[in-house]
Amino acid sequence: MPHSFYKKLAEAPNVFTFKDYVIVPGKAEVEPSQVDINSSFTKNIRVSLPFVSSPMDTVTESEMAIALARMGGIGVIHRNMTVEEQVEQVRRVKRAESFIIRDVYTIQPESTVSQAIEVMNKYNISGLPVVEGDRLTGIVTKRDVSFADLNWRVCDVMTKKVVTAKPNVTVEEAKKIMHDHRIEKLPVIDDKGKLLGLITIKDVYSRERYSTATRDPEGRLRVAAAISPFDLQRAKALDKYVDVLVCDVAHFHNTNILNSTKKVANEVKADLVIGNIGTGQALKDSISIIDRVDGVRVGIGSGSTCMTSVITKAAAPTLFAVASTADAMEELGLEIPIIADGGIRNSGDALLALAAGASTVMMGMVFAGCRESPGNLIKIGGKYYKPLRGMGSLSARQKRFVIDRYASAAKGIAEGVEGYVPYRGDAQSVIEEFALGLRASLGYSGANSIKDLWSKARFGLVTNAGLEELKPHDIILPGE
Ligand code: XMP
């Protein structure tokens, strides 16, 4: 006996989207430049900017993740590659900078100059500590080897009296030692001469330049990586290096997926983000099964490349999904950061998502247009573009690693499209523009932080007719 259609209609929620609402201006207590847009990506990881890049193979690999973390956000490395390749992408971010590099490339004194050059070229580094066993015996740089015979031994050309630092050296002390001795690399050793790490002047300067970067306690950039809840082996391999593991399935609210994620949560140390979910009920069911949830990725059907709702008529648009999970979170008395994922085109959309209760926003289309995203720049009709493809698109699925993002019955159907997006330039300028816009929006809302916005934001419903008035109109814009 079917339930009454009219009863269901009466109970139908309003599944609003970014275009449906504006923020009603409120009294501003502080200037936009003083507004605090710090936030949390997960329970344990703070970010100075609430921007996250999507795990898509035209959006986030190491270059994008490094750019985002330096600016104060975080990138999620996609999983459409082998486990080894994804681990290497994560390690590249971790090696990009740190105060004391622990994972140091070294060479032995009896090795040849030619071998030393080979290691330096392979890893694109300019010098190597020389070790016998684990004891430091010298340091060899590109300058030492550039005029040496290739068959000479490293111990013949290396600097033997090495300036070193103790393990508890501070950034300021390291900088002074390097400055006083005019050196660019400072090995860190213990009392017995064992090599513990390496400090480089490049990393020290980078730390100063990107003072609000998202870093781990060792000073390395933070990075997240996407996983399938069914791929425990991948999760464990990444867990050794990554800060956050992000579940990457289109419809997380599924008994098999929940049970599988429970196992992953118990086997890994990294923070765990679940998703994508679209409703408060999905949050409640997830929390009741999975023992540890550090972040929640929400939104189904709003993504720029998304065909899910066209094909299935199922959708939890991002703004609705945020509001629905945020309400459930409050009801449950939980404080798990919400990541609003899909459909964010500008800082105004980001503001709405944050106002509804999100802590950060995840963007694919916006970051795909940046220099740091994978894929070549192409010129069409005199303008530059970069590729963007949905992870459910046929071409993305040809690599097979993302096939389990979608329900098995629908494996043959493309749930994503592929195409091009306008080139936007460096991620840094895009992020700065978004941050400025967000600060201005918070100013209009009368809120001085994202948390303040959660309580102060007042939403205004826009009619379909009204949409026209809320953007430039009655003027011919150049290029139209
Ligand atoms: P934007 O709008 O920022 O959205 O490009 C990024 C998010 O879209 C999701 N995504 C997909 N959704 N089919 C979908 O239904 C797809 O092929 C697809 N690829 C990505 C994903 O959540 C991403 O973060």
Image (cartoon, helix red, strand yellow):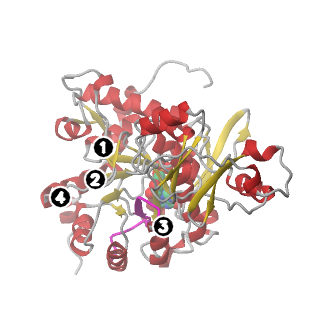
Q: Amino acid at mark 4?
A: Leu
- Bin the neighbour count of mark 2 within 10 Å (Cα to Cα): few under 14, some 14-19, many 20 and up: many
Residue 439, compared with residue 344, is above or below; it is above
Label whose residue precedes the other's in the sequence (3 or 4): 3
- The quarter of the rendered structure image containing the C terminus is top right
x and y, in percent, of residue 27 in the image? 18, 23
Q: Is residue 253 magenta?
A: yes
Residue that badge 2 annotates: 337
- Judge whether residue 307 can be spotted in this image: no
x and y, in percent, of residue 130 in the image? 64, 56
Q: Front-most of 188 and 53?
A: 188
Q: Amino acid at mark 2?
A: Pro
Q: Front-most of 176 and 300?
A: 176
Q: Could you give the CA–CA distance between mark 1 and mark 4, rounded to whole angstroms?
A: 16 Å
Instruction: Determine whether the residue tagged by mark 3 lies in a helix, strand or loop.
Output: helix
Task: Identify the mark at residue 334; answer none if there is no mark.
Answer: 4
- Judge whether residue 288 can be spotted in this image: yes
**Which quadrant of the view contains residue 461?**
top left
Q: Amino acid at mark 3?
A: Leu
Residue that badge 3 annotates: 238
Q: Could you give the CA–CA distance between mark 3 and mark 1, rounded to whole angstroms?
A: 25 Å
Label whose residue precedes the other's in the sequence (1 or 2): 1
Left or right, 292 with reference to 157: left
Mark 1–mark 2 CB contact (< 8 Å)? yes
Q: Could you give the CA–CA distance between mark 1 and mark 2, rounded to whole angstroms?
A: 9 Å
- The quarter of the rendered structure image containing the N terminus is bottom left
Q: Is residue 272 magenta?
A: no
